[in-house]
Image (cartoon, rainbow, N blue to C red):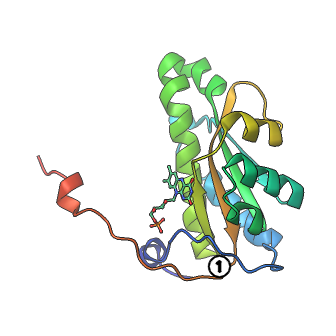
Amino acid sequence: MWDFFETVRHRHSVRQYQSGIAVEREKLNAILEMACAAPSAGDLQSYKIFVVEAVEKRLALSQAAENQEFIAQAPVCLVFCADHKRSSEMYGERGEKLYAIQDATIAASYAQLAIVAAGMASTWVGHFSEQTVAEIVENEEGSVPVALLSVGYPAELPEQKSRRRMDEMVSYI
Ligand SMILES: Cc1cc2nc3c(=O)[nH]c(=O)nc-3n(C[C@H](O)[C@H](O)[C@H](O)COP(=O)(O)O)c2cc1C
C-alpha cells in the first residue's frame, strides 16, 4: 500500500479504462468507507452517494455529461449529491448553501484518493446536467448532484498536469 504522499502524487484524471475488468466489491466498499470517513459540518454527513454499475445507467450519465464517453466506459460511476435539506435543518442558509456542498465534495475527494490507494483511477466530472443526473439516480428532493467519479482500472497513464506556482495561491501572513 502506498503512503499518503505517493498516493496523492499518483492521482491523475484517467479517461481510458480497461474494459471487462470489474471493480471488486471489497475494494468498492473500502473506497466508500473512506469517503464516509471524511469530515463534515456538525458530523451530519450531508450527502448521498449513488453507486452506478448498470451499463444503461452509466450510458445515461455519460449522455447527461455532454457525452463524456469515459463515464460509460468505466465499470463504476459514483454520484455525489449534496443534501442541502439535511444541513439546513441545523445550520440554516449557511448549511444549505455551503456546508452541504463542502460535505459532499470532501467525501468525493477522499474517495478519489482511496481509489488510487486501491490501485485504480478516476476522473472527477463536474460538467453535467444536474436535473438529468438527479433523474437517473432517482434522487430525492433537497439533495443535488455535485460531482461524478468514474472508477475503474486505468488503460492509460496520463502525463503529470502542471500546477500554478505555489506562491500564487499560498500566502504566509
Ligand atoms: C470541480 C471539477 C470539475 C471537473 N469536471 C471535469 C469534467 O467534466 N470532465 C473531465 O474530463 N474532467 C473534469 N475535471 C478534471 C480536471 O480536468 C482535472 O482534475 C484537471 O485537469 C487536473 O488534472 P489531474 O486531475 O490529472 O491532476 C474536473 C475536476 C474538478 C475538480
Q: Position of residue 85 (x, y in %)?
A: 65, 23
- Residue closer to the observer: 26 or 159: 159
Q: Position of residue 27 (x, y in %)?
A: 74, 71
Q: Is residue 142 left or right of residue 112?
A: right
Q: Identify which residue is drawn at 66% across, 33% down.
A: 144
Residue beneath disc 1: 154
Q: Is residue 137 above or below residue 74?
A: above
Whether residue 126 is visible, yes or no, is yes
Residue name at image x 81 percent, y 56 percent = 59
Q: Residue at x 53, y 16 (%)?
A: 92
> Which residue ends up furthest to the left in the rendered image?
173
State the image coordinates of residue 25 (x, y, percent, origin top left).
Answer: 82, 69
Among the 4 quarters of the image, the one containing residue 44: top right
Q: Is residue 170 left or right of residue 12?
A: left
Q: Does residue 38 appear in the picture of this structure?
A: no
Q: Label 1, secondary structure: give it.
A: loop
Quadrant in the rendering for residue 53: bottom right
- How many numbered markers are drawn? 1
Quadrant of the rendered structure where residue 56 is? bottom right
Q: Is residue 87 above or below residue 20?
A: above
Q: Which residue does the image show at 54% across and 68% down from the upper left?
A: 13
